[in-house]
Image (cartoon, grey):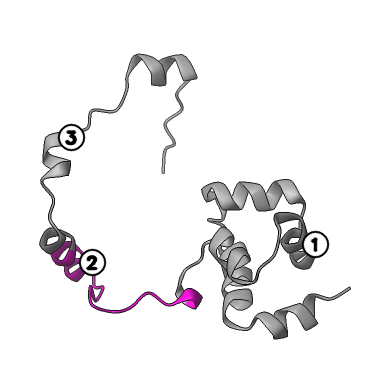
Amino acid sequence: MAVARMTLADIVANPPKVDKAALSAVTDADVARYMIEDGQDPDEELRLEDAISPALIRRHLGMTQEGFAILLGIPLATLRGWEQGGAADPVARALLRIVAREPEAARRALAR
């Protein structure tokens, strides 16, 4: 897989072309249809343990970024990167899934 590399100047000079009218015309029914086409159930409720959002999990646990980073044993900068959309690594997602599903067990397991 080739990776396209662009400089900031390239990005500024060539902004993405988004059809805002078409985007605004998307209805809830359209979204439900897209979900069905992707094999998802649009009527299924989102459960916290299914959401791999570090910020959502951290807030649910009532923790600060610093405290959550210490719990996970990662640098604070790494957690901040994850919270900005960088937790795409499968290991990071697995760790977050464990913490979301079994927070007390994770706390015991990760205690230093």
Q: Position of residue 74 (x, y in %)?
A: 76, 57
Instruction: Give the number of the mark in front: 1 or 2.
Output: 1
Q: Position of residue 70 (x, y in %)?
A: 80, 62
**Amino acid identity at mark 2:** Asp
Mark 3 Cα within 10 Å, few/some/many (few <14, many 20+)?
few
Q: Is residue 91 visible?
A: no
Q: Which mark is residue 38?
A: 2
**Amino acid identity at mark 1:** Ile
Q: Which mark is residue 9?
A: none
- Could you tell me which quadrant the C terminus lies in? bottom right
- Residue at (76%, 55%) from the top-left corner? 66
Is 36 covered by the magenta stretch?
yes
Q: Which residues are magenta?
A: 32-49
Q: Position of residue 6 (x, y in %)?
A: 45, 23
Q: Is residue 80 visible?
A: yes
* Residue 22 shown left or right of residue 70 in the figure: left
Sequence-earlier tag: 1 or 2? 2
Instruction: Give the number of the mark in front: 2 or 3.
Output: 3
Q: Position of residue 86 (x, y in %)?
A: 56, 49
Where residue 101 sits, quadrant-wise, is bottom right
**Amino acid identity at mark 3:** Lys
Q: Which residue is mark 1?
A: 70
- Could you tell me which quadrant the N terminus lies in? top left
- Residue at (67%, 53%) from the top-left corner? 79
Q: Secondary structure at mark 3?
A: helix
Where residue 21 sits, quadrant-wise, is top left
